Amino acid sequence: MKNHTTENFGFHFENSYLQLPNEFYSKVQLNSVEEPAILLLNRTLAKQLELNVDALFKEGAQVLAGSQIPKNAAQIAQAYAGHQFGHFNMLGDGRALLIGEHVTKNNTRFDIQLKGSGRTPYSRGGDGRAALGPMLREFLISEAMFALHVPTTRSLAVTTTGEPIYREQVYEGAVLTRVAASHLRVGTFQYAASFCDREALKELADYAIMRHYPQLMQAENRYLAFLEEVLDRQASLVANWQFIGFIHGVMNTDNMTISGETIDYGPCAFMDRYDRSTVFSSIDRESRYSYGNQPQMAGWNIARFAESLLPLIHDDVDEAIQLAQKTIEQFPSIYETYYYNGMREKLGMLTADPGDEGLVDELLALMEENEADYTNTLRALSENKRTDEAVFQSPKFGEWEQKWLTRITQQGSTLEEALQVMQSVNPVVIPRNHQVEHAIQTFVEGDTAPFMELLQVLTNPFHLQPEHKKYTQLPNDDTPPFVSYCGT
């Protein structure tokens, strides 16, 4: 007889989401699989969640594949809508099962979701399943993002199903166990505003505020304050993406969380050579979500969020619009404050000076002009190295460098002190697309070693062992341009 801890593997579920009106979710029938097996278990995260790690790995495959449900589980798919590349659609968890809200001893709440667990009422004709490769990709990238200090959902496990997945070819099926502060999205509020009544929208907003921003419950206008907080979180999040050259690829409103975490790693990728127009997603044919457009599109998404909250912000429609408009107009300046403060730190400028923005922009323009690698260039500066790359050989760089060194001196710190700060925020390694694809492909083919080594390197991105130098290298010139896919 298994004890309670083993049966539930340490999960302590309190499913507050079920207190919302039932139009926000659907109960899901389990889609059992033939032979589930845990391929990857994030033991560090499991321990942080206070789970029974050994029991989960040995006996938890049925649960992590969605064939069995732990005690007190929710077993639901969430409803939401969203603008997908500018077009509004009714959506929902088409291949995900929320098994519950796990609460730790310090009362921190986490959604535990199974991605690829089978059909739901929102599957829209799909099979609700996922292939192994994309689930490995989300595991790797989300953990790399966490190590890079970017707010993100995380990956607890990848579990194979023992069943084939039919797409353009046959793949091995898998389920990702995703951990999130919540799965509340901008699209959740769009759904409420479009398909529910005002009372349901109010219940959703109050729930989100209590879960993520409880200090706002006493605000004079809590819903306007809620808009301001989410705006601030999204501005900060996208600034963090820009700092590391991360391109989300599918910034639809259903992929923008209320908590401010990065979610959905389908067509994401990382920029090598600095180019604001960089886009990798095969479905982003108009470059809507290119690297340079990400701040603007985050602001666009916030405007959609504001529209959803209008009935709550004020009873008078015109007054509600005026208040919301005044708030969302602040997004560009709030974003720029986060962005330039972060870039100051990346360049060792520890105080604020009116000329800093120009100094940052001048360096980025030099990098773009000389097709310089974004990550390697900033890391070389952090280590006070000047390689034979074209950007460092440019006469314009020499001029910029003198201005930068003068700026460092003027702030009252030594160059060594500035470099120390720079090395703490400029990574040596990022998940370079060609290396990620190689690691995933070899894993799928049966050789797990490259994937596990890359994962190890990416979980300590600000330090690098000499034997891992290859992970700083760009793809060969004859490598075809990288294209990312949604991975459904």
Image: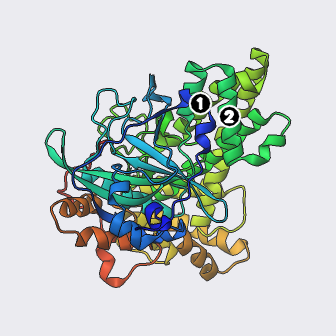
Q: How packed is label 1: few (under 14 Cα within 10 Å), some, or many (20 or more)?
A: many
Closer to us: 2 or 256: 2
Judging depth in this view, the residue of 48 and 462 nearest the camera is 48
Could one spot residue 428 in this view of the protein?
no
Residue 345's place in the image compared with 220, above or below, is below
Q: Can you say whether 379 is above or below 109 in the image?
A: below
Q: Position of residue 121 (x, y in %)?
A: 39, 29
Using the image, tell me which numbered label, if any, was put on residue 189. Answer: 1
Q: Residue at x 55, y 48 (%)?
A: 238
Q: Residue at x 29, y 27 (%)?
A: 125
Judged left or right of residue 430, residue 486 is left
| Quadrant the N terminus occupies | bottom left
Distance, label 1 to label 2, CA atoms, is 8 Å
Residue occupying the point 51% across, 55% down: 152
Q: Residue 33: percent from the left, percent from the top? A: 25, 48
The circle drawn on residue 213 is none
> Label 1 is placed on what type of residue?
Phe
Element under disc 2: helix
User: What residue did someone put label 2 on?
Assistant: 205
